[in-house]
Each structure stands twice: as structure tokens, then as C-alpha cells.
Image (spheres, rainbow, N blue to C red):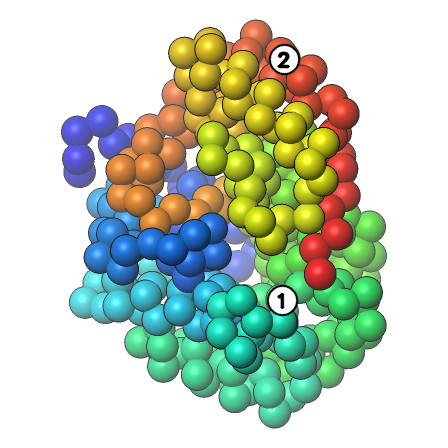
Amino acid sequence: MPAGCCQVTYNELGKTGRSVSRLSFGASALGDVYGPVDEGAAIEAVEAALECGINYFDVAPAYGATLAETRLGKALRGTPRHRYFLSTKVGKYLEDGPNGPATLDYSRPRIRQAFEESLERLGVDCLDFLYIHDIEYQGGRYTKWALEEGLETVLELKREGRVGAFGFGFYPADLWRHVLSAYPIDVALIHNHHCLHDTRLLELLPVAQRNGVGVVNGSPFASGLLTERGAPEWHPASPEARACFRAAADFCRNAGTSLSQLAIQFATQNPAIPTTLFSSADPGLVFDNVRWSEQPLDQGLLKEVQRILAPVRDQDWNYV
């Protein structure tokens, strides 16, 4: 293990029977979602995560129009399968390249086809977790389809032994309240709701825990808003909101630290949350995030930064 890289700890993920690292690796950055990356560095980032003891990797065919899956598959090839848990998603696809519009298709034939294609890109014959992706997009016109035919198809894959556990990955907190209460899922990938300016995930945890649902906390950096570089152009945050996040980053910099460091510390240090999913295609940043997640949180700094971010507290973003 590299010097300064702390060994991560592990938690049971709901009723899945899997013990996952408290910090897990999201592969969206490998698909150029936050800007172009070097493939060699991206593969080294995955290797760095493995070196630090991270054992859960998540991806989706929509990330870079299958580029992230392809790169993650290359990076994991040769690693014994028992060393890591793996998830991908179905239902959302980019058919016309990484910058093309998203296609939502929750039909049985398309999910089964996409599932097989993902397995081939990832170089595996089964998945530990499978999520139905972004069911609220395009004004929610396909949500019912996803909750009916989509869910039944993924249940079939689980019954066939192709998938260990299943659930959803999407954003709106009100939709999560409904799904967690009404549907028999194993895992929930809830993004952008346990970070410095948005803690609505804490309101969802009790019902998830009662039902044995394993919660994955996604986007501790708020899709880039809680970083020094800021969010990519596709993020729906307004110029005024972006200025608020820049002010928080400036405050942290002047205090001798970084907004990213504070963000990962805050997101990972609630013992009720089994795992937090971060993404990076930079091996150095992978080591940094693991180390930061094990360091104590500066409560005084946290209070000041949350004061700066008060105008965007629990702000809903219109992801489409």
C-alpha cells in the first residue's frame, strides 16, 4: 500500500450479504463525464483504489456512452473476481456518443440486451448489484415503466442468478420516499443528498434501514460543485449557485485546505451510511480521498462553509 494511503474500513450493505468498503469507487470520471482523461491514468486510478482496499466499483453504460464501462473492464481485468464487488445500471443509454441525448428504455428486451453488453465490456459473467438508472428523467414520463416492466426484468435476472442484488439509482428525494416504502429492493444508490449543502439522505435512512435496503451515498462532491474546479458545463446549477460554491472553495483555500477535502470527510463519516461513492480518474486524488476520509472533520470549518452554502441548502437540480 502506498505511503500515506490509509486502509479503508468495511460495512455490511443492507441485506445483500456483501461487506463493502466505506469509500467506494464510481467510474463515471473514467467516461470523460467531468472532462477528457488519459486512459492510462484512469486505469491507474482503479489500481490505486484496489491498493487502498476499496472493494466496490460502480459504473453505467450511460457514462461516456459505454466508455467508462470499457475502461473499468480493462482496469479490473486480471484482478481476482473475489477481490471486488461490481455494479452497473440499465435503462439509460447514450446512443449518439458521449455528448448525445439520453435514451430511456425500460423494456425487457432492451434491459436484457444492455445487461449482456455490459457484462462483455466489464469482462465478467455476473454482477453483484444492478441498478435501474435515472427513472425520473425527461419529466418522469417513463417512471411507471421503470417501476413495472423494468423492475420485473431485473428481478428475473436476480432469480436466474445473474445479479446478486438489485435496486434503483436516481436523484429526487420525494421519489425515493415512495420507492423505499413501496418496492422490494435490495440496494439504493442515492446521489447528491448527503453532502455539505444537502443532507436529505438522513431523512430517508430510517425507512431504508427498516426494510433492510443497503444505501449507497453517491456524489459526495455534488457532481463537481464541491470541488475547486467546479461543476462541468452540463450541470444545471445557475450562475448564482455556482458563485456560492466558488465562495466556499475560496474560503477553504484561504483556510489552508480544500473544499474537496472537507466534502469527502463530511460525506463519509456518518456511521449509519454504509458506503460513499466517489469518482476520480487521477490516481493521486484516489489516494488523497482515502486518506482524507480517515482524518477527523474540522467542525469549525464545516460550520463556516455550511453558512456560506446556506443559499443553496437542499437545492433541487433539474437533471434531465
Residue found at x 41% / y 29%? 293
Depth order, front residue of 7/28: 28
Circle 2 Cα neighbour tier, 10 Å, few/some/many (<14 / 14–19 / ≥20): few
Is residue 136 left or right of 98 when viewed as pictured?
right
Q: Which mark is residue 37?
A: none
Location of the N terminus (image quadrant)? top left
Residue found at x 77% / y 78%? 145
Is residue 181 left or right of 82 when viewed as pictured?
right
Can residue 85 be seen here? The reply is: yes
Q: Quadrant of residue 154?
A: bottom right
Can residue 88 be seen here? The reply is: no
Residue found at x 76% / y 37%? 315
User: Against 245, is 237 above or below?
Assistant: below
Is residue 150 left or right of 267 when viewed as pictured?
right
- Pointer 1 residue: 133
Depth order, front residue of 49/153: 49
Depth order, front residue of 203/47: 47
The amino acid marked with disc number 2 is Lys
Disc 1 secondary structure class: strand
User: Against 77, is 10 above or below?
Assistant: above
Residue found at x 77% / y 60%? 179
Q: Quadrant of residue 67?
A: bottom left
Disc 2 secondary structure class: helix
- Image coordinates of residue 191 in percent, x first then y, are 62, 48
Circle 1 Cα neighbour tier, 10 Å, few/some/many (<14 / 14–19 / ≥20): many
> Alpha-carbon distance for marks 1 and 2?
34 Å
User: Against 207, is 260 above or below?
Assistant: above
- Image coordinates of residue 164 in percent, x first then y, are 49, 70
- Pointer 2 residue: 303
Count numbered badges in the picture.
2
